[in-house]
Amino acid sequence: MKKYILGNICFIQSGGTPDRSVSEFYNSPDISWAKVGDLEEGKSITTTEEFISNEGLKSIGNRVFEKGTVLLALYGSTLGKTCITEIRLSCNQAVLGLFSKDSNILDNTYLKYWFDYNKERIIFRQKGGAQKNLNADYIKKLGIVLPSISHQRKSVALLEQIQTLISDRIKSMNILDEYLQNIFLDMFLENPLFEAGSDYWGKVSDVLKDTIYGTAKKANSDQKGIPVIRMNNITYKGEIDIQNLKWVELESKESEKLKLNDGDILFNRTNSKELVGKTAVWESGDGFTFAGYLVKLVLNQDKMIPYYFSDYMNSHFGKRILFYKGKSSGSQVNFSASLLKTQKILIPPIEMQRDYEKVYLNVKAQKQSFAKSLYLLKELFQSALNDAFKDNNENDKDEIDLLIADDIRLELFLNTFVNSDYQNEELYSIEIERLFTILERTSNENNKNTNNKKGIIQRLEKAKIIIEANREYKNRLLDEAITS
C-alpha cells in the first residue's frame, strides 16, 4: 500500500461551456458534450443529449476527455456523483474529469469506486457550511492509498460483476412494468370492443362512492401524530413509497375521516404538468392519513377495480386528459375532485377488470421478488466496496470502534439516526443498539481518560437529552466554517 496525492498521479481538469449565442459552436455533431444530467447513478456514459463543433471545443480550450475518464459532479443536487465515460467527450464546468497518468499505478475504474466510497467524506465540509461546492484544486490535493494494480483490478472486477447484476434486476423490473402496460393497452385502450362512442364509456362519477380531500395541517418530522402520505410519496409509476414519511397531529374525529383503507385510491390533484394526476392504490394497512394536495377516492368496486382505475389514470390516455383539461397556474396544474368526476373513463365489464387484476397481482409479486433481490445485491455491493477500500489497519477493529474513531462517519451516523423515519422495527432496533453501544464505550473511555475527545456525548438542554459528537469536534467544525 502506498499513499499518493491525486494531482500527482492524475490528469485533472473541469469542462467548459461554449458561448450559447454562437450557433456555430452547437450546429455540428463533432464532439459529444456532457452535462451533470448525463451522469446517471451506476451507469457509464455512452451518449449525450448535446454536441458541440470543433470550433466550440476550441473556444473552451480544447477541454476534451478520452474514453475511460472518471467524471465527477462538482456542485448542485448531484454533488459527488461519478461515472465513467465510454466515449470521447467534452463537458460543462460543473463536471471534473480525472484520468490516470500511469495505468500501472492507478486504474481509472478503481478511482471511480474510490470516489463513491469516500463521497460523504469528500463533501462533508459542504454539510457544515464551509464549502458549498467541490473544485479542481480541492480534488487535486486529496490523498489516496493504493494497493497493487493487480489488487485494484480484482476489486474492480468483483464490483463490476455485482453492478451488472444490479442493472439486470432493474431492467427486469422495468420490463415487467412495460409488460403490464402493454397488457392494459391490449385488453382495454386498444381493444376495438371499447372504441370511442361505445356503451362502455362513462364518467368518473359513475364509479365513485366518495371523494375526500387530505389534511391541510403542517406535517412534522418528530413522529408526533400519525404518518401522512404526501404527493412525493406517490411515484411516477403509480406506486406508494413509505420510506420517507412525515407525521401530522389530528383530532380523533378528523383522524377517522381521513384514515386510509386498503383499496382506497390516492390522486395527486396538483403538481407540475408532467406529474399532476399521479394515482396509486393504497394497500399498506391502517394507521396512515394523507395530505391536502391529494384526494382520496373510494370506488364502487362492483363497477370498478382499484388497480384498473389507477392504471387507467396513469396511462397515456389518462395523462392526456389531465394535461389538457387541468387548470393551470404558472408551472402548476390543478385538477379538483369535482373536475375529475366529470371526466370520461372506460368502464369495461367487471369480469375483464378482475382478469386484469389477476395479471397485475402476479406481476406485482414478481416485482417484489426482484426488489428483494435488488436490495440484497445493493447490500452485497456496499460490502464489497467496504472490503475494497477500508484501511488495512481497520481489520483489527470492530464496526463500533471504527465509527467512534472517525469523526466524520460518527457525525453522519448521528445525522442519519436523527432524521430517519424507521418503518422497519428490526432496522430501528439495530440502530438503537449501535447508538447505545457507542454511548457505553464513549462513557467507559471517558472514565479511563478524561481527555478523551472521541465518541458521542449527552447533554441536557431544556429538559431534553441531546446526543452529539464530542464538543471539541463540534467547535472545530464551527471554527472551519468561520475561518474558511
Image (tube, grey):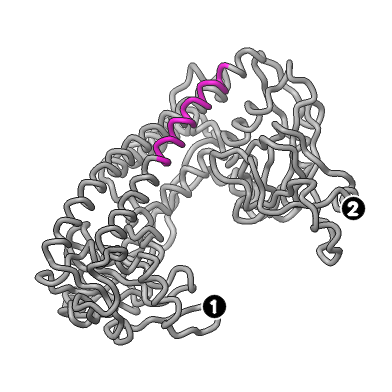
The answer to whether residue 149 is left or right of residue 294 is: right
Dominant secondary structure of the residues highlighted in magenta in the image: helix
Q: Quadrant of the N terminus?
A: top right
Q: Can you say whether 41 is above or below 418 in the image?
A: above
Q: Mark 1 — residue?
A: 331
Q: Which image quadrant for residue 208?
A: bottom left
Work out whether residue 110 or residue 40 is closer to the camera in this orientation and state it.
Answer: 40
Marks 2,1: beta carbons within 8 A: no
Q: Can you say whether 281 is above or below 86 in the image?
A: below
Q: Residue at x 50, y 17 (%)?
A: 395
CA separation in Å, label 2 and label 1: 35 Å
The answer to whether residue 386 is left or right of residue 34 is: left
Work out whether residue 278 or residue 119 is closer to the camera in this orientation and state it.
Answer: 278
Q: Residue at x 16, y 69 (%)?
A: 304
The answer to whether residue 166 is left or right of residue 299 is: right
| Mark number displayed over residue 398 | none
Q: Amino acid at mark 2?
A: Ser
Residue 115 at x, y percent in the picture: 63, 35
Work out whether residue 285 or residue 124 is closer to the camera in this orientation and state it.
Answer: 285
The answer to whether residue 386 is left or right of residue 480 is: left
Residue 391 at x, y percent in the picture: 58, 22
Q: Residue at x 14, y 68 (%)?
A: 349
Q: Secondary structure at mark 1?
A: loop
Is residue 265 visible from the viewing direction of this image?
Answer: yes
| Magenta-highlighted residues | 154-171
Q: Secondary structure at mark 2?
A: helix
Residue 409 at x, y percent in the picture: 53, 38
Residue 363 at x, y percent in the picture: 26, 47
Q: Mark 2 — residue?
A: 59
